[in-house]
Amino acid sequence: MTGFSAEQAANRKRAKAAPGPMAMFFRGFLKHPVMVGSIIPSSKAVINRMLAPVDWANTKLFVEYGPGVGTFTRPILERLAPDATLVAIDTNPDFCEYLKISIPDSRLQIVNGSAVDVNEILEQLGFGQADYACSGLPFSTLPPGIGPAIADATSAALRPGGAFLVYQFNPKVRDIVAPSFKHVDHAFEFWNVPPAQLWWFRND
């Protein structure tokens, strides 16, 4: 039976010593409330409904903005094909480090950066356009101009027929993101604290 490498053993030790997801999420909210946007992670109901329309069989590249402690990251990886890739982009280096330690999945590539730079990030990683992008970033509280810039960049980063999945608490996100896309679908999920608004933006 093969033992763990020194690096794997070190990562396992660091993972055991790291705070739990809830503690890490709360810590991130206290440090960056404008970027995290909620004091607790999204519910399972939000996750399942948000990801339900995804065509997983034909998804090769999925992008996530603001993965935090992996509330959506893990369910996405559970559904993602073995040969597909998830690129998770977060401005918080603490969350990036936490994900690297707690989710040892070769399909996951974690980038400490901004969603505004998604096209440059994908190019640097050697990827073309993504099939889907998902975001829980609080668009209504982002600095002026950042929300529309993320929407424009995401529209360009998605292949024809791809979709931008956004879960929010504030309906203002439609005014910010919709101008960059041709079609918008919307739903409410009340089994969440607070109730969440779900949006699917498409260009097909």
Image (cartoon, rainbow, N blue to C red):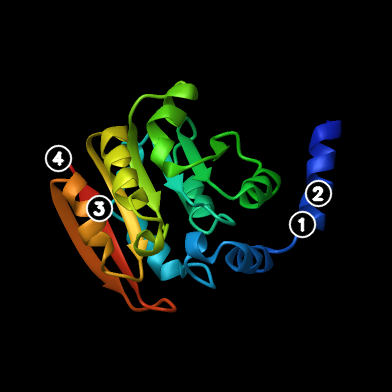
Q: Give the amino acid at mark 1.
A: Ala
What is the distance, in whole Å, between disc 3 and disc 2 at their CAs?
38 Å
Q: Is residue 126 left or right of residue 26?
A: left
Hey, which quadrant is residue 22 in on the image?
A: bottom right
Q: Which of disc 4 and disc 3 is earlier in sequence?
A: 3
State how far apart marks 4 and 2 are (Cα).
44 Å
Relative to the observer, which residue lies in front, 153 or 185? Answer: 153
Q: Quadrant of the N terminus?
A: top right
Badge 4 amino acid:
Asp
Residue projecting furthest to the front:
144
Q: Is residue 120 above or below residue 18?
A: above
User: Could you tell me the amino acid type at mark 2?
Assistant: Arg
Number of the label disc, if any, that sits on residue 14: 2
Q: Of the numbered discs in the image, which one, if any, rests on residue 18?
A: 1
First-in-chain label (3 vs 2)? 2
* Residue drawn 49% across the image and 52% down it: 66
Marks 4 and 2 close (CB-CB < 8 Å): no
Where residue 145 appears, as percent x and y from the top left, is 33, 50
Secondary structure at numbered mark 2:
helix
Q: Residue at x 18, y 58 (%)?
A: 185
> What residue did someone put label 4 on?
204
Measured Cα–Cα span from mark 3 to mark 1: 36 Å
Q: Is residue 179 left or right of residue 112?
A: left
Dot 2 and dot 1 residues touching (CB under 8 Å): yes
Residue 59 x/y as whole percent: 35, 36
Q: Are marks 3 and 2 in contact (CB under 8 Å)?
A: no
Q: Horizontal and vertical percent for residue 11? A: 78, 42
Q: Amino acid at mark 3?
A: Val
Label 4 secondary element: loop
Q: Are marks 4 and 1 in contact (CB under 8 Å)?
A: no
In this picture, residue 110 sits left or right of residue 81: right
Residue 138, position as x, y percentages in the image:
40, 62
